[in-house]
Image (cartoon, helix red, strand yellow):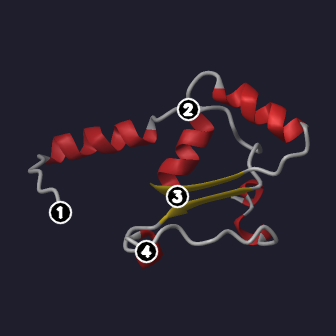
Amino acid sequence: MLRVDLTTEKRYRVMDACLAIRCRPEAPAALRSLRDAGVRLAFPSNMTQTMLEAGIRNSGLEGVFDHVRGRTWGDSRCHGRGAPAIDASDSAKDSSES
């Protein structure tokens, strides 16, 4: 494990940067083209759900993905064993319901 001593101020700056994340400028048009062509899109990520949703919002990608799933701190499924499979029929995690 990486041990980095951060002051409270530096921790807040790191977290603020994570919540301000945006996608690459060309990504929205490409993703919308896929969506318009009928491709179902999922966004699994090792980011926390809060960071992931902020990035989607900051990038103007609300409603583009069928499924959006980030991790929660302490979620053992996301540590060392890969991300859990996404059940395409699982509408409970549908991004439009978030």
Residue, disc 4: 75
Image height of 29 relative to 41, above or below: above
Residue sitting nearer the eye, 43 or 48: 43
In 3D space, how far apart are the residues under numbered discs 3 and 4 (Cα atoms)? Answer: 12 Å
- Residue at x-position 11% and y-position 46%: 7
In 3D space, how far apart are the residues under numbered discs 2 and 1 (Cα atoms)? Answer: 28 Å
Q: Position of residue 95 (x, y in %)?
A: 72, 55
Residue, disc 1: 1
Residue mark closest to the camera, 3 vs 2: 2
Q: Position of residue 93 (x, y in %)?
A: 70, 66
- Residue at x-position 56% and y-position 27%: 24
Residue, disc 2: 23
Q: Earlier in the sequence, mark 2 or mark 1?
A: 1
Asked whether the beta carbons under mark 4 and mark 1 sit within 8 Å of each other, the answer is no
Image height of 2 relative to 72, above or below: above
User: In the drawing, does residue 4 fall left or right of residue 37?
Assistant: left
Q: Amino acid at mark 2?
A: Cys
Residue, disc 3: 49
Q: Position of residue 48 (x, y in %)?
A: 46, 57
Q: Secondary structure at mark 4?
A: loop
Quarter holding the N terminus is bottom left
User: In the drawing, does residue 96 fall left or right of residue 68?
Assistant: right
Residue sitting nearer the eye, 62 or 65: 65
User: In the drawing, does residue 74 fall left or right of residue 56?
Assistant: left
Q: How many neighbours does mark 2 have within 10 angstroms: few (below 14), some (14-19), or many (20 or more)? A: few
Q: How many neighbours does mark 1 have within 10 angstroms: few (below 14), some (14-19), or many (20 or more)? A: few
Image height of 48 relative to 30, above or below: below
Residue mark closest to the camera, 2 vs 1: 1
The answer to which image quadrant residue 78 occupies is bottom left
Q: Earlier in the sequence, mark 4 or mark 1?
A: 1
Quarter holding the C terminus is bottom right
Image height of 95 relative to 62, above or below: below
